Image (cartoon, coloured by chain):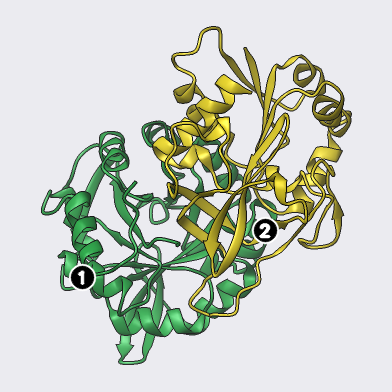
Amino acid sequence: MLKKRIIPCLDVYKGRVVKGINFLNLKDAGDPVEQAKIYSDHGADELCFLDITASHEKRSILLDKVSQTANSCLIPLTVGGGVRSIEDIQNLLRAGADKVSINTAAVLNPDFIKQSAIKFGSQCIVIAIDVKKINSSQWEVFTHGGRKSTGIDAISYCKEVEKLGAGEILLTSMDRDGTQEGYDLDLLNTVNNTISIPVVASGGAGTPQHLYDGLSKGGASAVLAASIFHFKKFTILEIKKYLLKKGVPIRQN
Amino acid sequence: MDVVIVDYGTGNLRSVYKALETAGKDLNDLKISISGSPNIIAKADKIILPGQGSYKQCMDSILSIDGLYEELNKFVKIKRKPLFGICVGMQLFSTEGYEEKKTKGFGWVEGIVEKIKLKDKNFKLPHMGWNNLIMMKKHKIFEGIEQNSHFYFVHSYEFSTKNKEKILGTTHYEGDIISCIGDGNIFGTQFHPEKSHENGIKLLFNFLKYY
């Protein structure tokens, strides 16, 4: 049986793992290479490495850090941040990424999703979407690390990226990000019922209960979290034990 | 032992390299290289055939390198040397694939590759994540690996064959998906051993040691 995935997220700023609240007020949370090794050895199902200001500062990602991080883990690694060309993707894959996550560039040029999926296969194209709630059934897409409003409806955008060949959607609620109040379950449910590719829940996890809610009530295929792991509130093993006890299919061996 | 990872411009070869290096760290005289040159492949003792993207793209890329298709065929069918296919690399063992359009494969194992058919909409495509390997028979490649161990999958197309004795492992995803195929000197996995932590390393080790 396919297992639900637990994905620690390394938000990287100037080569260090950081964590903020609502995308602001960054706190240092260690070295990505060391963290990746620990998570991989402790049972994480995947890792996500996001260079959080790459798009904002219009610079390309820290390829060296990516390749060191990839070298220290034997589980799938998704890398994102400032990915805007076929060449960027090629460089990241060469550096050791298994999947790349595209955010701003996909909104600005949806055809880029299609071209990347044709060239590298849908399985390695993750579309990261940052959204803010408008009302109980509507969300708006934001770009540039949450700095720019786009006026685009998140649900129709999810449908569009699926059609263009995305293999997975990494869905972040900006309202919840870093708040540790739990995932936006309405958002997850709405998107999950609309599309047939896997959805990764992100933004707001603070307790194991939140991860459980995201996977069960929200129907997410995977949960991505940062603070809950980085500041050693809970280990991956503790979280996995908790989820198993609640009946969530989780990988143990 | 000279092991070559076949580079035809697809996928994350570094992951495969790194995993092989880890798997073979206690083996003497192991030399791993990445190459798409038919001359270098011809001299290899064992090869790994990775594959990412579509069946058609992978086959087109192999055919675009002068002499590569012929050398791979010779390696497997005439020299009968060991080859390990990963993901689309395994799918290419088939007679033909139906991703994008009908494309001829190597035909080493009679069978076809088609999109996974799902009825229940709770099953998403791609089939992405960790799933259990059900070993169908005792085999040297599985030494030290427990029944139902987890491996990492990411694919939307599956191999099917009437040749049941070539199916070494299956995996449940609504229906049964063929996850390991073996036939004499060739072995392939639908999952990614290079991304499957310790279980994947064991499998690669067994290939290096026993094939």
Q: Colour of chain A?
A: green
Q: Residues within 10 Å of mark 2 (few under 14, many from 20)?
A: many
Q: Is residue B188 above or below residue A217?
A: above
Left or right of residue B142: residue A21: left
* Residue B86 percent across, percent down from the top left: 63, 41
* Residue B26 percent across, percent down from the top left: 44, 14
Q: Residue furthest top?
A: B29
Is there any visible trace of residue B43 in the rendered image? yes
Query: Chain drawn yellow, letter?
Result: B
Toward the viewer: A72 or B4? B4
Q: Are marks 1 and 2 on the same chain?
A: no
* Residue B7 percent across, percent down from the top left: 69, 32
The quadrant in which the N terminus of chain A is found is: bottom left
Which amino acid type is shown beneath numbered disc 2?
Glu
Residue at position x 77%, y 43% in the image: B93
Q: Secondary structure at mark 2?
A: strand
- Marks 1 & 2, CB-CB < 8 Å contact: no
Q: Which label belongs to residue A210? A: 1
Residue at position x 54%, y 76% in the image: A196
